Image (cartoon, rainbow, N blue to C red):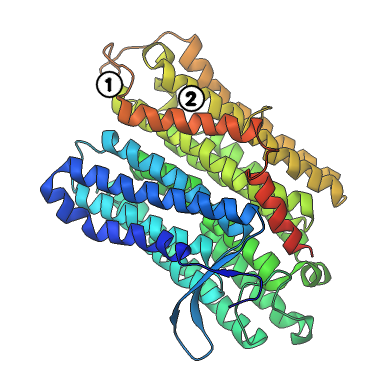
Amino acid sequence: MTTDATGSILPLFAFLIPIVAAVCTVPLQRISARVRDYSLLACGAAVAVLAVWLAAGVAEGGVYETFILQLTPDIWMYLRVDAAGALFGATVAVLWVLALVYSWGYMAEGHRLGRYYSFFMLCLGWTMGVAYSGNLLTFLIFYELFSILTYPLVVHEQTPEAMAAGTKYIIYILIGGSLVLLAIVLTFFAAGQQTLTDGGILSAEIGHGRLFAIFWCFIAGLGVKAAIVPLHGWVPDAHPAAPAPFSAVLSGVMVAAGSFGIIRVVFQVFGVEILREMGVAVMVTWLAGITVLFAAVLAVNQDNLKRRLAYSTISQMAYVVLGVSLLGPEGTIGALVHITNHAFMKGALFLCAGLFIRRLGVHRVSQLDGAARRMPVTAAAFALAALGMIGTPPLSGFVSKWYLGLGMLETEHPLLLVVLLGGALMAAIYLLPIVYRMYFREPVLTSDDRITAEGREAPASMLVPLVVISVLTAALGLAASLHGMPVWLARIAVEGFFR
């Protein structure tokens, strides 16, 4: 046990509760769907409460850890909740429970619901493990398991498109995971340990050649999940294929897991000083900047709504990698906060897309004319999340992009503001026309588009999570400076990274 941490079993519960829930899903479903739903909700809510409680404790200066299993005399499976992990864990848990409630209405008439909910909860458990991993081996185990267990949810609809998307997804993920494994093995032999430590565990004494090899294996492996161009190919297919509630968490936190892993590697495996000496951060900056703009341009040309939002995710998550690559405190704060803010904004957009699909039979942007008249709450939620995604003050998206901009000035990279503002402009170009169609165009009712005059607002089980996530999108901006909010936790994390 490290001297600055408090032993606690709570991180273990945050991982185990969803696993137990997944195992019990099918027996509970045999009793009744209602028993299954409320039991899973109780488990999901318990995880969310634990995650928020741990985040509150970390905001007060605490760090929590637990040792799970000794694998060798020198290596444990080990959970440690620091500021970065607490912020990501709370984001994961809260978004997941909202998507779970939304699933009640969206998946009500679906097939193989036992399989869907089992893997949905399994993925929650393993993702919490990613958030709270205390060393590289633990991170690898949780990261690989949640990546593989995502596959049944991507292909859940079992359409030809879903199966093709699943095949592409699993190929990308297995290649990326192999590179992460190689990087971790090289790190262990180079450093003699693999505990994630502020300031890094690698030394310049091992030679720049080995450091370069380890760094780029990590960036390439984690870059697959983070969807850095040109490693992004699975995202535009997987998001439209998956059910909407899972698309929300896939885009909101699962893609973010790759970016979160890069944060761990940069600040807790290498450390700022070594990376500055190596000079590799500038190459990552270029990759991230290209990804922001390239994916945004591709989003503009997509008529399929979920595919447009998928390209938006690629663009927006690249802001996180861009902020980290600056190797400055303010940019890193912006990166950490953007993971949380993007999760709720993009979650709201995908939940809205699911409602348009279920209530209006609409999959394409060109079919959304007049949608606000029939689904006013959904349209308002979409508009709010879209404005946040663009970076409109005082919404949450503005806060994280403000810190990213400060980071660019702090590290004397003012030209990168062109990327920041260009990405925001492109977001406006691919999101605001959707809002315009919903509010200012007359609906075109055709049998081909399956839009009917009976289209109406969704039931409460789908609408309440959407309203809650929309409120969070606004609240995380309006209350950004308050104690215990994401900016506060990000500052605590950054103090350790740059100590």
Residue positioned most to the left = 30
What's the distance in space between the residues labelled 2 and 1, CA to CA? 23 Å
Between residue 167 and residue 34, name the one nearer to us: 34
Q: Secondary structure at mark 1?
A: loop
Contact between marks 2 and 1 (CB within 8 A): the answer is no
Disc 1 residue type? Answer: Arg
| Position of residue 143 in the picture relative to residue 108 (left or right) | right
- Neighbour class for label 2 at 10 Å: few (<14), some, many (≥20)? many
Please name the residue shown 39% across and 59% down the image. Answer: 125
Question: Residue 470 location in percent, x, y?
Answer: 50, 29
- Of mark 2 and mark 1, the one earlier in the sequence is 2
Q: Quadrant of the N terminus?
A: bottom right
Write down the quadrant of residue 65 in the picture: bottom right
Between residue 207 and residue 164, name the one nearer to us: 207
Question: Residue 373 location in percent, x, y?
Answer: 40, 11
Residue positioned most to the right = 412
Q: Mark 2 — residue?
A: 381
Q: Secondary structure at mark 2?
A: helix
* Above or below: residue 52 compared with residue 269: above
Question: Residue 154 location in percent, x, y?
Answer: 34, 51
Q: Which mark is residue 450?
A: 1
* Above or below: residue 42 compared with residue 282: above
Q: Quadrant of the C terminus?
A: bottom right
Give the number of callouts.
2
Disc 2 residue type? Answer: Ala
Question: Residue 132 location in percent, x, y?
Answer: 52, 63
- Neighbour class for label 1 at 10 Å: few (<14), some, many (≥20)? some
Q: Which mark is residue 307?
A: none
Q: Is residue 161 visible?
A: no
Q: Nearer the viewer, mark 2 or mark 1?
A: 2
Q: Is residue 414 visible?
A: yes
